[in-house]
Amino acid sequence: MIDYLYLFLYKIFALLSRTLPRGLMDRLLMAISKFAYKFDRKHNHIINANLKLAFGDKLSQNRRDEIGINVFYNLLQNIIGFMRRDSSSKEEILKGIEFKNSHIFQKALEDKRAVVLITAHYSNWELLSIAVALKFNIELVAVGRKLDSPLMDRVLKRNREKYGVEMVYRRGAIKNLLKALKMGKVVGLLLDQHLGERQGGVEVSFFNHKALHSPSASILARSLDALIIPIFIHTENYKSYKITFYEPIELLKTENREADILKMTQAQALVTQKIIENDPNQWFWVHKRWKGFYPDIYNRG
């Protein structure tokens, strides 16, 4: 029964997202974001703990509050954007999106290289995967967590797959991703969350502090001589977007497999860090990114 309630609410908000004037919707989302940041004590604490660890005393509390509000606002823009795209055409989705350095990706496709695109929960990450699949007419395989609601999980999966993004779940993901790459598909990975050592996380430096990072892209690249290409989306107004491809991470394949994977993974963490430093407003600071080494910062009282 609860599944159908979720679906009903989804349909209501999807209708509002398409009928309310955009300016009014944006003001409503900002009001909700300010309310959520103020009263969601749990996530407020996580956001501030992360910002304090990452930037030390470089940010004032007012600046941390500004970033915290934007965390919620960015998430809501992701959700509303997802709803707006539910029945959009390829042309409508790609309108207002600028692609920068796309020759990097285009050359890899022309050379028939296996490609792993890496990004983060940054800006409108939901739009990113769909836009790339549509722009380059490719099959993009991404890893996601299955939603607690089976009905809503089907809605999410259907919305992504109709635009060329195939979803695989985390369990057994590497095997499925290797298979996809061998079939000529492109793999896209969100690699900015904590991954415990038991799950295979490796130690990297992230904002000059130790963190555990997924080596998935490094493992895939080393196994199939694949290119790891960082890609990020950015916006100033949530109306127009810029998607930028960055130079591929150097592929290492020496006799020391563990060292190769660690170096490639560290390079990915550093690229992500630089993007976030450039505009911290658009990263999802809600993840307990450093809990593998600094769990105490997330304790409240």
Image (tube, rainbow, N blue to C red):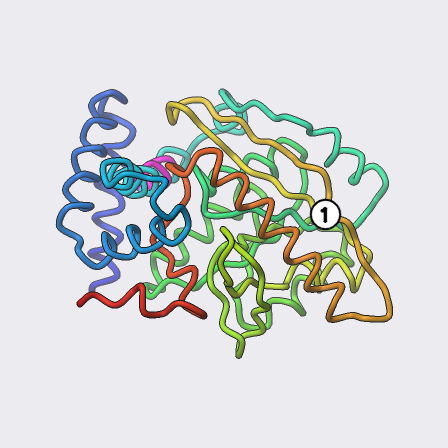
Query: Does the stretch in magenta take in 78?
Result: yes
Residue closer to the observer: 66 or 124: 66
Q: Is residue 113 above or below residue 60?
A: below
- In the displayed structure, does residue 270 sit left or right of residue 36? right
The x and y percentages for residue 188 are 61, 50
- In the displayed structure, does residue 285 sit left or right of residue 264? left
Indicate the quadrant containing the N terminus: top left, top right, bottom left or bottom right: bottom left
Indicate the quadrant containing the C terminus: top left, top right, bottom left or bottom right: bottom left
Residue closer to the observer: 115 or 248: 248
Residue closer to the observer: 88 or 196: 196
The x and y percentages for residue 180 are 70, 58
Residue closer to the observer: 73 or 28: 73
Q: Which residues are magenta?
A: 76-81
- In the displayed structure, does residue 67 sit left or right of residue 102? left
Secondary element type, mark 1 = loop
Q: Quadrant of residue 223?
A: bottom right
Query: Circle 1 is placed at which residue position?
Result: 249
Q: Is residue 238 above or below residue 69?
A: above
The secondary structure that most of the magenta stretch takes on is: helix
